Each structure stands twice: as structure tokens, then as C-alpha cells.
Amino acid sequence: MSGANPVDAAELLRLGSATLYEASGQDCFLDAAFRPAWDGAEIVGRAVPVAAQAGDNLALHHGLEAAGPGDVLVVDAGGAPFGYWGEVMAVAAQARGIAGLVIDGGVRDTAQLRELGFAAFSTSISIRGTIKHWPGTIGIPITLRGRVVNAGDLVVADRDGVAILPAGDVERIRDAARARAAKEDAYMARLRAGELTLDLYDFRRFGDPIRPAADPNGAR
């Protein structure tokens, strides 16, 4: 990505969406229905919110014009399983330096998207065609399954899910994620040495589980 946030995309991907979300202290994750269109897809970039109507992808074509290098089209298509995006639009997006797509709706041409290396996250894979009638909205906040996405928010998406980091809070979240990752590295060393998670996280303070009553005759 270029420019808008003083962060290193490679570092954010190393930290991962799950660690960034946990470190944020916020509900900044998207619903688990959002999955990569091909295994290994990853995105870091600034959100360009787009609202489309069910079965109509004209708004996404306008989004291609509005977005620039390092941007991610984040699209509310209401979850309708149509093929809003495929190889043709991915090629056009890459020519403009667009970093990826996140859509509550369907994509297709997944083999071609993988070959192109264009990262797309969607709630379905669908070959069903679309119409081109409603131009939609571009840059206006959208809500994806309960999560608000504003223009300029930072999208971090990987195999684990999609995190939407508020634009003004990215550096704090990154620093908190660094600290969390360092702490977890120390925990891993203790676990490899045989320590139990019950003791590592002090979970024994919550009490012991209920177990079968002991047989006085020693039978199990």
C-alpha cells in the first residue's frame, strides 16, 4: 500500500488479523462469513466503502474509478450470492494499483484471481450474472453485518479473517499488537518446556471441573 498510514504492510500481515483485532480492544472484525476467494490471499490497504444493490454490480465499476493505489474496495451488496467481481474487473483493478476487494456478496473466476494474485474476500462464490442499473454510493460509510466501515479505515485480511482498523487508531493498534506478539513468543517457549495453559494463564483461579465420583473399589 502507499501513503495514507505510516505502517508497514508486511509487518501487519506478519502480526495477522487475529492479533491486530485482539490487540485493538475493539470489535473491529468482520463476520466469519467473509473468506478468501483463494487460499493464501492477503490484503492490507485503505478502505473505499461501496454500496451496491443485490444483483447489480454497476457500483463496483464506479468504485474502480474512485479507488487508487493501495486502496481496498469494501462493498456492501447485502450478501446476495451473485458474481459481482471476476477476472475482468481484477485486471482493471490491478492496473490502478488497487490492493484488493472485500465484499458481502459473491465473486467468481477464482482460479484466475489466484493466477493474477488479486486478493478478494467474499461471503460466497457465485457464477450468477449481474445487471448494471444502480450506480450505488462511493466513500460513504457502510455497515457490513453490524460492522461500520469508513473511508480510510485500514483493512487487514488473511486466512483467519478480516480486521477493519479505524484510520486514526492504526499506530496504537500496531504497537499493541507488537507487544502482544512478543508476549506470546515468551509464552510459546514456556509451553514447549511443558507448562500447562491452566498455569500459564492462571486459569486455576476459576476452580476445578466437575469429575466423575471416585469408585471406592478403584474401578474407573
Image: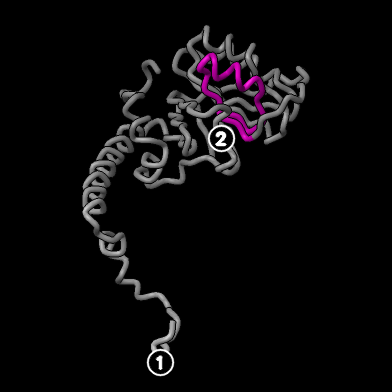
Residue at (37% x, 39% y) in the render: 20
Q: Quadrant of residue 165?
A: top left
Mark 2 nearby-residue class (10 Å; few <14, some 14–19, many ≥20): many
**In this rendering, is residue 141 above or below 180?**
above
Look at the image and tell me in which quarter the N terminus lies: top left
Measure the alpha-carbon separation of dots 2 and 1.
Answer: 54 Å
Q: Position of residue 57 (x, y in %)?
A: 70, 21
Residue that label 1 marks:
217
**What amino acid type is highlighted by mark number 1?**
Asn
Q: Are marks 2 and 1 in contact (CB under 8 Å)?
A: no
Relative placement, left or right, of 191 versus 88 is left
Residue 93: which quarter of the image? top right
Crowding near the residue tagged with mark 1, few <14, some 14–19, many ≥20 C-alpha atoms within 10 Å: few
> Residue 52 at x, y = what percent?
68, 26
Q: Does 129 lie within the magenta span?
A: no
- Left or right of 170: which side holds 110? right
102 or 38, nearer to the observer:
38
The amino acid beneath tag 2 is: Arg
66 in relation to 110, above or below:
above
At 36% across and 41% down in the image, what residue appears? 19
Residue 35 marker: 2
Front-most of 124 and 211?
A: 211
Q: Which mark is residue 168?
A: none
Q: Nearer the viewer, residue 166 or 24?
A: 24
Q: Secondary structure at mark 1?
A: loop
Q: Quadrant of the C terminus?
A: bottom left
Q: Residue at x 52, y 34 (%)?
A: 149
What span is in magenta?
A: 102-123
